[in-house]
Image: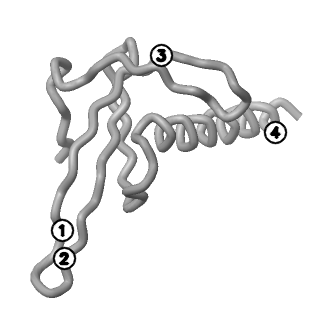
Amino acid sequence: MACYRAESSFAEQAVCMPRGETVTMKLAERGSLVGTTPDTIWLREVRKLTESGHQTSLISTAYGLDHTVLAARMFTRWCHFNFQEVRSSED
């Protein structure tokens, strides 16, 4: 079952992409404690909302990075992957 956030949970954020350009993304962040004592771990979720209403979730244990940095790295990688998929299908 999918777990969606209310649109009001998202805030527009300026995200600096790896090549230096700045884009605006609607992001939401929250944490979850997963597991049972003594094997619990704290996870962060960064969720992106697109203009069409689609939500994409990123789960991470990278506590030292700002959520906008995580978003930039993950969503840049997906864009690159999708570009390569389209490019290879055209050959």
Task: Determine which residue is flagged by label 2.
Answer: 40
User: The residue under label 4 is which amino acid type?
Assistant: Ser
- Name which residue lies at 48% across and 43% down: 70
Image position, residue 82 (x, y; %): 65, 35
- Labelled disc at residue 88: 4
Residue lying furthest left: 37
Residue in the foreground of this view, choosing between 78 and 36: 36
Task: Determine which residue is flagged by label 1.
Answer: 34
User: The residue under label 1 is which amino acid type?
Assistant: Val
- Labelled disc at residue 24: 3
Q: Quadrant of residue 56?
A: top left
Upstream in sequence: badge 2 or badge 3:
3
Q: Quadrant of residue 64?
A: bottom left
User: The residue under label 2 is which amino acid type?
Assistant: Thr
Image position, residue 39 (x, y; %): 20, 84
Upstream in sequence: badge 1 or badge 4:
1
Give the side of residue 69 with respect to residue 60, left or right: right
Residue in the foreground of this view, choosing between 62 and 25: 62
